Image: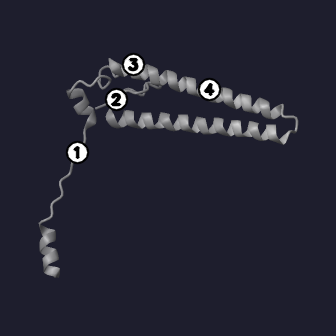
Amino acid sequence: MQNLIQSNASHLRFNTVRLDFITRANVIKLPGASLEDPNAGFGLLINQILSIVLVIGVIAVLFYLIVGSVEWITSGGDKGKAEKARDKMTQAVIGLVILVSVFAIMMFIQQLLGICIINVAGSCQITE
């Protein structure tokens, strides 16, 4: 039995696969994947839409947090109003965590695929 396992183990071969998304995206001229101008074509449109959505989301979260804080201050000791205001502030913080997570995921995808999703402080300078 042990000889059978050893003889089968000597015939096993594992192939490795190399994924090179950046080079492939440039070869097929995928919009937004250009090393010269990562913000070209369709990539520019997606970049602008996502940037606007993230800014609107952050503004909405801050507004919601401020409204919850004002409601808490003006609750006047009413436990129901204070609880409602605290829930509103908790939801704002959860929204902020979600926005930061989405941003981090987009930056990870940007680095992994070599495309420009969001250009923050020159983060779209893709090197080969």
Q: CA distance from mark 1 to mark 4?
A: 42 Å
Q: Which numbered disc, 1 or 4, marks the residue that appears first in the sequence?
A: 1
Q: Which numbered disc, 1 or 2, marks the residue that appears first in the sequence?
A: 1
The percent coordinates of residue 84 (x first, y second) are 75, 38
Element on which disc 3 rests: helix
Q: Which numbered disc, 4 or 3, marks the residue that appears first in the sequence?
A: 3
* Labels 2 and 3 touching (C-beta < 8 A): no
In the drawing, what numbered circle is on residue 60? Answer: 4
Q: Amino acid at mark 1?
A: Arg
* Residue that numbered label 1 is attached to: 18
Q: Identify the residue at image location x=15%, y=75%.
A: 6
| Left or right, residue 80 beside residue 40 | right
Element on which disc 1 rests: loop
Q: Quadrant of residue 47?
A: top left
Q: CA distance from mark 2 to mark 3?
A: 13 Å
* Labels 1 and 4 touching (C-beta < 8 A): no
Q: Is residue 104 above or below residue 11?
A: above
Q: Which numbered disc, 2 or 3, marks the residue that appears first in the sequence?
A: 3
Q: Amino acid at mark 4?
A: Ala
In the drawing, what numbered circle is on residue 115? Answer: 2
In front here: 34 or 51? 51
Q: Quadrant of residue 8?
A: bottom left
Tell me the mark number nearer the camera, choosing from 4 and 2: 4
The percent coordinates of residue 42 (x first, y second) are 34, 20
* Residue that numbered label 3 is attached to: 45
Q: Residues within 10 Å of mark 3 (few under 14, many from 20)?
A: some
Element on which disc 4 rests: helix
